[in-house]
Amino acid sequence: MTTLENTLGLGLVRQPKTVLFGPGQRRQLGRYARGFGTRALVVTDERMATTPEFKSMHDDLVTQGMSVSVFDQALPDLPRQNVLDATAGRATGGIDVIVGIGGGSCMDLAKAVSVILAHGGDVRDYFGEFAVPGPGVPIITIPTTGGTGAEVTSLAIVYDDVSQMKMAIADAHIAPAVAIIDPELTLTCPPGLTAATAADALSHLIEAYTARPKNPTPDQVATQIYVGKNRITDMFCAQGLRLMNQSLGTVVREPSNLAARSDVMFAAYCAGMAINTTGTAAAHAIQSPMAAIGHTPHGFGVGALLPYVMRMNLPHCTAEFAEIAGLLGVADPGADQLDQAKAGIERVDELLENVGSPTELKSLGVAEEHFDQIAALAVKATRLVLNNPAPLTEANIKTLLARGVANDRSWWPVA
């Protein structure tokens, strides 16, 4: 049984300058946007653009004396073409603030557009860590789902049609200036999307809490986005896990319960704050190539992998899973650390099942003939591989996939 150790006692988060949370707070958009100038570009998706909530936010910007242009063609798994289309014909320096309203892809699109409008070029020029030469156009993010945490992260995930992979702009310069998090916007979120995004947020919390502490040097802090689990990220994870445990089931049973929606959305915010420094790990590294097979929504993909990822990681972070059991209220104080850790993992399984997330891989279209392809691509996600507490080798990934297809939740050997 082992534990992870932050020998530096490090605490580090990267975050927006302003975070505004609470029911109805979207009504402050115009006031905050006007502080950046008079010309706003709003990026969203086609469905959101037709809603009364969107119209009221748009009208609020106009009432504040702003000229507003709208790009409403954001797509899931943000394709590079969206960035090209949203920036086409827009002059560098012609926009004072960009507002991203919607799910993770809408907010990531706002970040990518911010970079191109400030610095020119192609979005591919900025893939990687700290490749953005300076500040972009200020960004305001307004999430409409409780899951991705993109409203506070310094990441923009873009599907590159050339490499046929999801690539990331990872840079503190693309952190939103303002995040307005209004749980009322999730009340009309469809049940399937609610479940998928909640599973994503839960996976963020688990992977951040069990990520490797890297004890980074000052140079690493300055040049790497993911610098490891630390005291401040643990604080956000702890709060997020408590809230998920308290309200995740209620959100599914009672979609109109605003208190539960608020808890889950705050938990997703906490998860975003954590992964902005820790990054995610095995579940996200494996999900990306796995998605090409069954085209499963991202949240359901990582949710289905999480039971097996946790069991693979258990021997390498037993103490952390035991702490998770305490946060989730299932730790027997008379049990030893390993049994407490197993109870924590089983409670996470239960939360995933309660929200309606698949917890095995066969139903997602994964079969043995896919294992080699998935494993070979997953290990290329180097930043995520290095975050995982267990060695993330192709052999380990194929073993994990076999267990996931068989719905085998037996425990991996503990030294």
Image (tube, grey):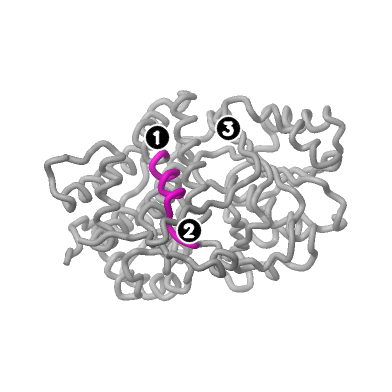
Question: Image quarter for residue 248?
Answer: top left
Between 91 and 17, the residue placed more toward the observer is 17
Q: Is residue 234 magenta?
A: yes
Query: Would you place residue 9 above or below residue 142 in this image?
Result: below
x, y percent for residue 9: 41, 56
Between 399 and 267, the residue placed more toward the observer is 267
Amino acid at pointer 2: Gly
The single residue placed furthest to the left in the displayed view is 334
Question: What range is drawn magenta here?
Answer: 227-239
Amino acid at pointer 1: Leu
**Pointer 2: what residue?**
279
x, y percent for residue 368: 31, 69
Residue 297 can be seen in this image: no
**Pointer 3: what residue?**
21
Which quarter of the rendered picture does the N terminus lie within?
bottom left
Q: Is residue 31 magenta?
A: no
Between 199 and 27, the residue placed more toward the observer is 27
Q: What's the distance in space between the residues labelled 2 and 1, CA to CA?
A: 21 Å
**Pointer 1: what residue?**
243
Residue 302 can be seen in this image: yes
Q: Residue at x 49, y 36 (%)?
A: 266
Of pointers 3 and 2, the one earlier in the residue sequence: 3
Left or right of 336 in this view: 22: right
Q: Residue at x 59, y 63 (%)?
A: 168
Query: Would you place residue 148 above or below residue 88 in this image?
Result: above
Amino acid at pointer 3: Phe
